[in-house]
Image: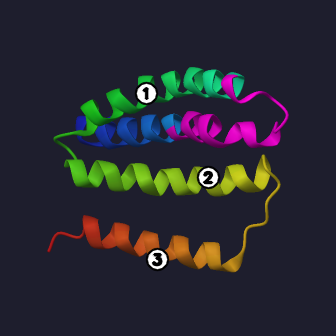
Amino acid sequence: MAPSLSIPVTTIGLLLLSNLFMTAAWYGHLKFPSVALPVVILASWGLAFFEYCLQVPANRIGYGYFNATELKTIQEALSLMVFMGFSVVYLGEPLRWNYLVGFGLIVLAVVVIFKKW
């Protein structure tokens, strides 16, 4: 893979994986309301460790190819995509039309941020 392509692919791939861990850490415990809060916190911290092990290198690798605002925008867009899938598949929540419209507006914001004005 050409260096110019490997940086964004690696960065986005690592950010996607980190968001899987982050979403599981933040929201996975919601299916287990009877588990004691200290246990849930420790389990979430354990998952968050892996999130950081992926997210920090993603930003290190991507910075320079992307600027900090672009990196954050990618992370937020991926976070919402991962969360939408997680909430439907894992939590069994409905995906409503207004969620899709809101996400579409966020995608529009991504376009505005990445456009070279």
How far is disc 1 from disc 2 in space, using C-alphas?
17 Å
Which of the two labelled residues, at mark 1 and mark 3, occupies the earlier sequence position?
1
**Label 1 belongs to which residue?**
52
Residue displayed at 44% across by 34% down: 14
Amino acid type of the residue tagged 2 in the rendering: Phe
Inspect the magenta stretch and tell me whether residue 55 lies in it: no
Q: Amino acid at mark 1?
A: Tyr
- What is the span of residues highlighted in magenta in the rendered image? 19-38
Q: Please report contact status of discs 1 and 2: CB closer than 8 Å, yes or no.
A: no
Gap between marks 3 and 2 measured at Cα: 16 Å
Tell me the kind of residue under disc 3.
Answer: Leu
Whether pointer 1 and pointer 3 mark residues with C-beta atoms closer than 8 Å, the reply is no
Helix, strand or loop at mark 2: helix
The quarter of the image holding the N terminus is: top left
Of the numbered discs 3 and 2, the one sitting upstream in the chain is 2
The image position of residue 91, as x and y in percent, is 79, 50
Residue 42 image-quadrant placement: top right
Q: How many numbered badges does the structure rendering display?
A: 3
Looking at the rendered structure, which numbered label has been put on residue 105?
3
